[in-house]
Image (spheres, helix red, strand yellow):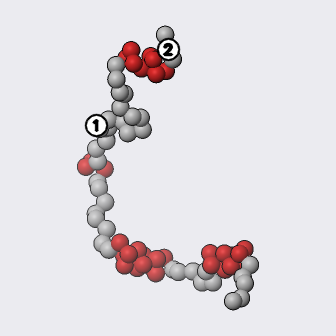
Amino acid sequence: MRSVDARTHNAVMSEPSESFTDDEYAFLRHVRFGELPPAVRPEDRVALTETDPRRDRPEPAGEPEEWNLRHGAG
C-alpha cells in the first residue's frame, strides 16, 4: 500500500480545488435542511428567563451541619 505524508494528505483534503457559488451553497443548504421557518419579527421576540434549576452544580445533599463536616469548616 502506498504511504501518504499526513501533512500533504490533510492539505489536499481540506482545500478544494474549486469553490461553490453562493447560489450553489444556498441549494446545498436547502437540500440538507429543507425549507427554513420564517424569521421571527422583532416585536414577537421575548427575553428568555431561566426557570429550571442550575445544571452546572449538583443539588446540595444533607444538612448544613453535615456540609461543615464534609468541607472541614468549624
Q: Pointer 1: residues within 10 angstroms few (<14), some, or many (20+)?
A: few
In the image, what residue occupies the spot 28% across and 63% down?
A: 38
Quarter holding the N terminus is: bottom right
Quadrant of the image occupied by residue 18? bottom right
Disc 2 target residue: 73
Q: Residue at x 42, y 78 (%)?
A: 28
Q: Is residue 35 left or right of residue 11?
A: left
Which tag is nearer the camera, tag 2 or tag 1?
Answer: 2
Q: Is residue 8 left or right of residue 65?
A: right
Q: Nearer the viewer, residue 13 or 49?
A: 13
Quarter where residue 60 is shown: top left
Q: How many marks?
A: 2
Task: Single out the residue that lies furthest toward the top.
Answer: 74
- Camera-side residue: 46 or 68? 68
Residue that numbered label 1 is attached to: 51
- Say which of 69 and 51 sits in front: 69
Q: Residue furthest bottom?
A: 1
- Considering the numbered disc 2 on the image, is that residue within a helix, a strand or a loop? loop
Amino acid residing under circle 2 = Ala
Q: Position of residue 69 (x, y in %)?
A: 45, 17
> Which badge, 2 or 1, comes first in the chain's sequence?
1
Query: At numbered mark 1, what does the secondary structure look like: helix, strand or loop?
Result: loop
Q: Amino acid at mark 1?
A: Thr
Name the residue located 71 percent from the left edge and 88 percent from the top edge.
Answer: 2
Whether residue 21 can be seen here = yes
Q: CA distance from mark 2 to mark 1?
A: 32 Å
